[in-house]
Image: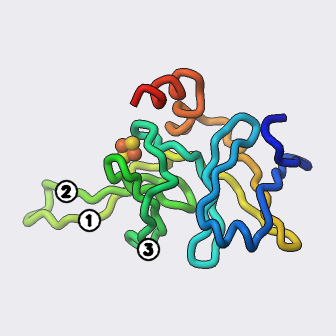
Amino acid sequence: MEGKEQSTGGLHFVGKKDEMIEAKRSFRTLEGRDILIIYHQGGFYAMDSYCYHAGGMLQNGDIEEIDGKLCIICPNHKYKLSLAKGECIYKGTDPREKPPVPRWYSKGVKQRTHMVTETNGEVYVKLSEDTSWIESDYYQGEKGKVERAKA
Ligand code: FES
């Protein structure tokens, strides 16, 4: 097992709840995967810590509610990723509309999110078990890590 976190049944202890709340953003490496744990407006969220677009550090991104979804905004190129699902949200227009009205659209799930639970003042993360490829997986792999280091 990687790191010093304890693990039981796929649940990784990541910290005491009050400390995680105070930190707001916490970085952990679980099973070799770099994860960002966020506390925002009363809820915990966890996602891959490098932006799927070009490996930006999401840890420093602002959080805003966009189209009813809490999103972290990547500091690099301002991609907006929903905290709950890792969907990439963008504003676009439909050229068939006359006149075109800008609206929020989703590119689908691009950033892998993980499950956060709290028990007795302790916070646990269970890594996503979705076996399909999600684009943020790239920056968790060897090739992506090399590319990130060069950026
Ligand atoms: Fe995040 Fe480009 S690296 S928007």
The residue sitting at 61% across, 36% down in the picture is: 132
Question: Which tag, 2 or 1, sits closer to the chain's start?
Answer: 2
- Look at the numbered discs 2 and 1 and tell me whether their residues touch, using CB distance below 8 Å: yes
Q: Quadrant of the N terminus?
A: top right
- Mark 1 lies on residue: 103
Taking the spot 44% from the left edge, 58% from the top edge, the residue there is 61
Residue placed furthest toward the right:
8
User: What x and y, as percent, mark residue 144?
Assistant: 51, 27
Q: Say the numbered circle drawn on residue 134.
A: none
Q: In the displayed structure, would residue 37 be above or below residue 143?
A: below
Which circle's residue, 3 or 1, is located before the other in the chain?
3
Which residue is rendered at x = 52% and y = 54% of the image? 59
Distance between the alpha carbons at the discs numbered 2 and 3: 21 Å
User: Which amino acid does the dot numbered 1 rest on?
Assistant: Arg
Residue at label 3?
Answer: 68
Label 3 – label 1 distance at C-alpha? 13 Å
Quadrant position of ligand 1: top left
Q: Considering the numbered disc 1 on the image, is that residue within a helix, a strand or a loop?
A: strand
Q: Secondary structure at mark 3?
A: loop
Q: Which residue is mark 2?
A: 94
Above or below — where is 111 with respect to 122? above
Residue 73 image point, x, y percent? 40, 58
User: Which residue is at the far bottom?
Assistant: 42
